[in-house]
Structures are given as C-alpha cells and as structure tokens.
Amino acid sequence: MAGLPGAISSVPDGMAAGVLAGVNPVHGLYASIFGPVGGGLTASSKLMVITTTSAAALAAGSAVAGVPPDRRSEALFLLTLIAGGLMVVAAVLRLGRFTRFVPHSVMIGFLTGVACNIVLGQLPDLAGSDVSGDFALDKAWNLLLDLGSVDLASLLAGAAAAAILVVLARSRLAPYSALIGLVIPTVAVIALEAASVLRVRDVGHIPQGLPMPGLPHLSELSVSLVSGACAVAALVLIQGAGVSESAPNPDGSRSEPNRDFLAQGVGNLLSGLFRGQPVGGSVGQTALSVAAGARTRWAAIFSGIWMAIILLAFSGIVGAVAMPTLAAVLIVAAIGSLRTGQLRAIMRTSRISQIAVCATFIATLLLPVAAAVGLGVVFALLMQLNREALDLRVVELVPNDSGSFTEQPAAPRLESRRAVLLDVYGSLYYAGARTLQAHLPDPEGSVSPAVVLRLRGRALLGATSYAVLSDYAARIAAVGGRFYLTGLDAEVLAQVQRNRTVENAGDVRLFQATEVIGEASLTAYRHAEEWVSAQN
C-alpha cells in the first residue's frame, strides 16, 4: 500500500514531465510505470523511487526541441535509451566516486536555474497563450509584451489549480493535492464548456491500454541528441546520488553508488523501450514513499504497478485534463523546490562559491540545458583545480631536541649556508604545482643553501611537479646549494629515479620514507646540516 500514494501523485507529475519534454504527456505516464519497476528491482538504495524528474525532462526537452513535432517522440525514446546505456556503462566502469567532485554551489545554481526555467516556460501555458520563444525567459518576456493573447478561461483554470495546490500543501491531503488540483478545475472546464481551454488530448492521442515494447528509429540520431543524452545521464546520476543519501536503507546497509547508477540505467532502458521518457532518482517521490510507510524496494515496484492499473482504468479520462492545470502543477512544484536557504548560505561563503552559483544559474537560464550542464561540469573541474591551488601552503619545520618539529611560516628567501626543512600542504597537481613554485623560498642571492623538501604521503607526482622541482633544483645548484627530497614513498622514489629530470638538474639527494613519521626528514635535515657545515 505504500506504493499507492506515489502512483496517484505520479499521474499529474508524469503528465507534467511529458509537457516539459515537449511530447505527449502520456509518455511521462509510461515512464512512471517502468522507471520505478526497473529501478526498484536493481537499486541498492531500497527506498529510492526512480521516476520522472523535472530536471531530466527539461534537459530531454531541450535536446529534442529542434526535432519536428511529428518525430519528437521517437527522438525522445532514442535519447532515453542512449542515456540509460550511458548510465549502465558508468556503473560498469565504477564512476560513482566522481559524483562527489561536483561542487554544491554548481548543483544549487543549476537546480535554481531549472526551477526558474520551469516557472517562466510554463507561464504561457498557464495563461492559455500561444506565444513562443527560443528559451523560457524569452517565452515569458513575449507573454508580457502580448498580454492580449491571454485566454481568461485558461488563466482561471490554471490559477484555480495553483490555489488548490497551495491550500492543500500543509493538509493531510498534501500527497493528493496535485491530483485534486487537476480534477476540480478540469471538471469546471468541462461543465462550463470552455472550448478555448486546451486539453491533453489536443496535444496528442492518448492510446488505450499499456504500450508494447519497441525500438526507436536510428534516423533520429544526431550530435545534439547524443549530447542531450549525456546531459540527462550526468544530471540523473548526480541527483540520484543525493537521493540515495537522503533515504538510507532501513536495515542499515550502505548504498552502493555504482549499483544505483545501474538501477537508473535499467529504469531508463525499460522506459525508452516502452515509449517513456528519461527517469531518475526523485527526491519528492522518494520522500512521499517513505512517508507512506515504505520499508523495502517493493514500495517503488508497486508504485509502478499501481500506475499501470490506474492508466488501464482511466486512460480515457487522462485526455480530458486541462493543460493549464498541468502548468500550474509544474509552477508550484518548481517554486517549492527553490532552495533559498542553501542559496543564502552559499552567498555568505567564499567568492569562488558565489561566482559558481551565479554563473551556473545564468548559464541554465540562457543556454540549452545540455550546454549548461557541460559548462557546469567544466566549471566544477576548474573550481576544484583552483581550490587545490589556493589551499597550498609551504611551511618550515624546525627540529626540536625531543625529535619533534615546530612549524612556522617559510621565509621568502633562503639564507646562505643554512639548512631549511620545508613541508607542503595541498595538492601538487597542475595549478597546485605552479603555486608551489611561487611559494618556495627564493635561492637568488644566497650562497650554498640546503633545502630539504618533505613529500611524505604523495602517491604520484605529475609532469608539472617534475618541471617545478627540477627548476628549483637547478636554481639551488646555481648558487652552490643542495636539494633534498625526503619522505618519498617507494613508488614515488622509483618514479623520480626513472624520470631523472630532478636528479639531473643539480645536486639532489633522495630519502625514502620509513615507518616512523618524520624519521626520513630528520635524517635528511641532519645530513644537510653536516653538508652546510662543511661549506663554511
């Protein structure tokens, strides 16, 4: 029984997702059948419901927007299958660990942009206007410029649905508020014979019964379709990781990100095979299922089964639903999904996070969703590299009589005939290595200095690190000094010896790490002091 409320709420949600994707709303209903069943059978997060989501629908709709309406559904099914295949490949390659590299600020900026796009894009449908535009903001602006195109009956139906949703949101009927918001205004439209109000059947034929499996035509394959499928896959996987964290397994077992990737891939493959649109882990449907008493994966599976029964029994009624009421459902849900608290928190943090959330938000408003997702991923990588570079510090370790070390800021310049022991905090990859180059004490003007650089815990060194270390070794050698690399793991030591660019750059000594922390560094430092004494 825990699956029944989710199935009932999936009727308006599924149809609304079809509207967002720009296809017959029935394809959202088909997805709400096969997504939960396929995903529920295979997910490691037993309470996660895999069904239609606004972000996936919007991304898919953006990818197929350029396809003629009579072929758009076929293109959508092909996109869904490609996205599902990509998710399965991601699971096989065990790419689940990479979801944590997407910054929170980038994801919040994107989701905020998606919510605003839904609101702006659905305003014409809510008002019964036929204005168009290249993107959601353009549609809303054109509506504002052409208020004479507003159909009063459609606007009243949509406003009534929105009012019902808001009023019932905090009542016991909240799980069914969207369905009630569709039914009451639609009944009023039928009773008043408001012919100007667009119905679901006007968008496309609503077939009787359940769909039969079928493969889409490969003639719809295009670069934009594949890029859209990649964007859908990335969105679904990232959102799904968040859903699995919000709904832990009741038995205490840990969720496996790669198996959840596989589950969402299976859900999309089944959905595309049975003429549905993209699906993914849904925060709202998962929360509703848990609130209804879900304890096992069978709640999600029965949600899909109930949805099939509802569609079999009431497919004729679906076509009579007023389109403005679906727009109202989308608008209210989008406004409710705005994470204003998290936005305020981000805007109170670092400048990098502020730029990330604003840039991703603006990109989502003005660019196709696939481009916005790609830009967000690239921006996330740049943020990661920039953060690692900014977090790098070079400190001096001064040995004590007890054998421990006192940490102090590293001097900007090296002193003549003096040994110094340095340690590095932060990443030494890419920009981090260049930041290290800028932070190391300058040997220019000194005579016979000795520098001991501690690299304990470094698993590998990149090409940029070798370039920086060899350059520093050459600069030290130019003033008659010696360079020590200490605390090297066995693999790093072998790598340095194979590379030889650092050793060939000057007088360089290598010390392998031992089991005793600090032992190799202290040995190297004493060796450096002896060498410096011999230079006096």
Image (tube, grey):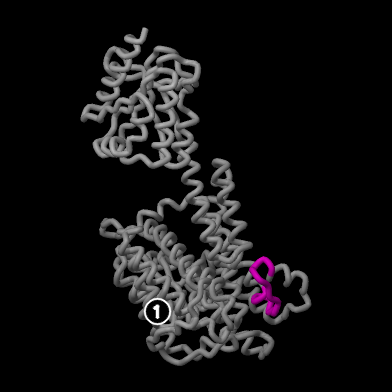
Mark 1, residues whose alpha carbon is within 10 Å: few (<14), some, or many (≥20)? many
Compared with 176, 431 (above or below) is above
Note whether 490 is above or below 357 in the view shown.
above
- Across and down, in percent, residue 498 comes to 29, 39
x, y percent for residue 227: 49, 68
Residue visible at 58% across and 83% down in the picture: 69
Q: Where is residue 324 in the image (x, y as percent from the top left)?
A: 62, 78
Tell me which corner region of the image, top left, top right, bottom left or bottom right, holds residue 334: bottom right
Considering every residue shown, the one lying at the far top of the view is 536
Residue beneath the point at 26% across and 25% down: 520
Quadrant position of the C terminus in the picture = top left
Q: Which of 263 and 497 is in front in this view?
A: 497
Left or right for 170, reference 150: left
Q: Which residue lies furthest to the left in this view?
A: 515
The span picked out in magenta is 124-138
**Magenta stretch holds residue 484:** no
Per the image, the residue denoted by label 1 is: 33
Q: Where is residue 152 in the image (x, y as percent from the top left)?
A: 72, 80
Q: Which of 289 and 530 is in front in this view?
A: 530
- Tell whether position 125 is magenta: yes
Residue 204 in view (yes/no):
yes
Please say whether residue 177 is visible from this viewpoint: no
Is 220 in front, or is 301?
220
Q: For the N terminus, which image quadrant?
A: bottom left
Q: What element carries label 1?
A: helix
**70 relative position to 504: left or right:** right
- Residue 237 figure quarter: bottom left
Q: How many marks?
A: 1
Splitting the image into 4 quarters, where does residue 467 fall? top left
Q: What residue type is labelled 1?
A: Ile
Q: Relative to the observer, which residue lies in front, 290 or 503?
A: 503
